[in-house]
Amino acid sequence: MNQVCQSCSMPLRSDYDKGTNADGSKSSEYCKFCFENGKFKDEGITLEQKIEKNIEIAKKMGIDEARARDLAQMTIPKLKRWKK
Ligand SMILES: [Zn+2]
């Protein structure tokens, strides 16, 4: 299983990582940091802002900024939330 959040690309390894739908069930597509009670927690954010946000999180996790930027720019635009 290789499922990732379709908003931020965080791996969804278990129900603990998953967000919640409006009916309280677990989302199969989005993580708990992005999605709660059927809504995006950062609704209205642009793709560019989401990429910057992800880079900040990656940096805090000790990932090199240039590498984090490459990774975010490669993966996030392909996710379901950002596809037009
Ligand atoms: Zn997410």
Image (spheres, rainbow, N blue to C red):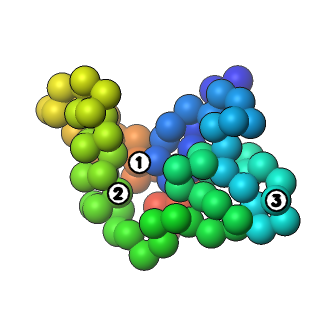
Give the CA separation, mark 3 to mark 2: 25 Å
Q: Are marks 1 and 2 in contact (CB under 8 Å)?
A: yes
Residue 11 position by quadrant: top right
Residue 5: percent from left, percent from top: 57, 44
Residue 66 position by quadrant: top left
Residue 62: percent from left, percent from top: 25, 24
Q: Amino acid at mark 2?
A: Lys
Residue 61: percent from left, percent from top: 31, 28
Q: Amino acid at mark 3?
A: Gly
Residue 3: percent from left, percent from top: 64, 34
Question: Looking at the picture, does residue 11 appear above or below residue 51?
Answer: above
Element on which disc 2 rests: helix
Q: Earlier in the sequence, mark 3 or mark 2?
A: 3
Q: Amino acid at mark 1?
A: Ile
Give the CA separation, mark 1 to mark 3: 26 Å
Determine if the C-beta at disc 3 is less than 8 A from ligand 1: no
Element on which disc 3 rests: loop
Question: Looking at the picture, does residue 62 appear above or below residue 35?
Answer: above
Disc 1 target residue = 76
Front position among marks 3 and 2:
3
* Farthest-out residue, bottom: 44
Front position among marks 1 and 3:
3
Disc 3 target residue = 24
| Structural crowding at the residue carrying mark 1, measured as other residues with C-alpha within 10 Å and reported as few (<14), some (14–19) or many (≥20) | many
Disc 2 target residue = 50
